[in-house]
Image (spheres, grey):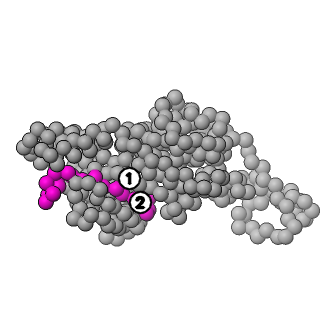
Amino acid sequence: MPDLSRSRLQELIGKGAVVLAGDHGQENAAIKDPNRRVKAGEAYTVAIPATISARPLGQDIPLNVVYEDKELIVIEKPAGLVVHPAAGNPDGTLVNALIAHCGDELIGIGGEARPGIVHRLDKDTSGLLVAAKTERAMASLAKQFANHTIERAYHALVWGAPRAREGVIEGQIGRSPFDRKRMAVLRGGGKLARTRYKVLETFGPAERPVASLIECRLETGRTHQIRVHLTHLGHPLIGDPQYGRARQAPRAKTPAEETAFTLAADFPRQALHAFILGFQHPTLHKTKRFESPWPADFAALAAALRNLKNP
């Protein structure tokens, strides 16, 4: 049944919704063991219950929709919007907005009329995000993310500039032993994380740049991966409240520097934007690729930093 994920089928088996039908000595016997071996000639019926209303309620929150069809939706998430309801953010999230926007088109994920969130962006990261509207799309996208075949690229404005113009940041990421609310690169434990980076532009003196624009491409998808890796590299994101607090803007000597340093020091979020998202469409069987322009705050900060080249 290609429209249902393995986990959804296992859930239905556990609820007794899969029945062995026909003349097999156990006619109409519900199957309880998902590991049961199927024999030639056996026939099964699967009773899929009607989709129930989503527990998160739909809310009329404006969305910037980049692409949408019956299977999935791609949106440009603004900074400040939480993706999924959780403690501290029970509503007003992207999920609430998608439930209201998609309405009856949500065929259901796990038996509920809700969107399938297969990846997330931090609250204060802007950019492209895809959500599934059907079980089939959910299973396909989740598999692509697990196999690292999704194309994801981010633009980041960071303090300073790495010595190597491009490279790979690799390390085990897990909870920091000093602050459980933060992630960190660990010597032992954690999960392997790989981020490819390339310095696209530097700002300020060539011998000692004040900041730089970096492109990051994820080979894995760990919590706060780019933020943690760039901090580990010694170049935290401008505006990052968790990982960039130790970096301060230098003292301004010119009007251009004063403008740029003030914008950087007061930037209200981590300067990170998911600008490319590409994946294999689950039913069209062709690659869909999207690019997102910089939001106004990110563009204004980059423009001010560029002025440092001509003080």
Residue at the farthest left position? 253
Looking at the figure, which quarter contains the N terminus?
Answer: bottom right
**Badge 1 is on which residue?**
154
**Badge 2 is on which residue?**
218
Highlighted magenta segment, given as a residue range: 203-222
Q: Image quadrant of residue 166?
A: bottom left
Residue 221 in magenta stretch: yes
Q: Position of residue 157 (x, y in %)?
A: 28, 50
Q: Position of residue 216 (x, y in %)?
A: 36, 57
- Estimate how packed mark 2 is, as few (under 14), some (14 to 19) or many (20 or more) residues with alpha carbons within 10 Å: many
Q: Amino acid at mark 1?
A: Tyr
- Estimate how packed mark 1 is, as few (under 14), some (14 to 19) or many (20 or more) residues with alpha carbons within 10 Å: many
> Residue at (63%, 40%) from the top-left corner?
106
Q: Amino acid at mark 2?
A: Leu
Position of residue 4 relative to residue 103, above or below, is below
- Real-space CA distance between mark 1 and mark 2, rounded to the nearest whole angstrom: 8 Å
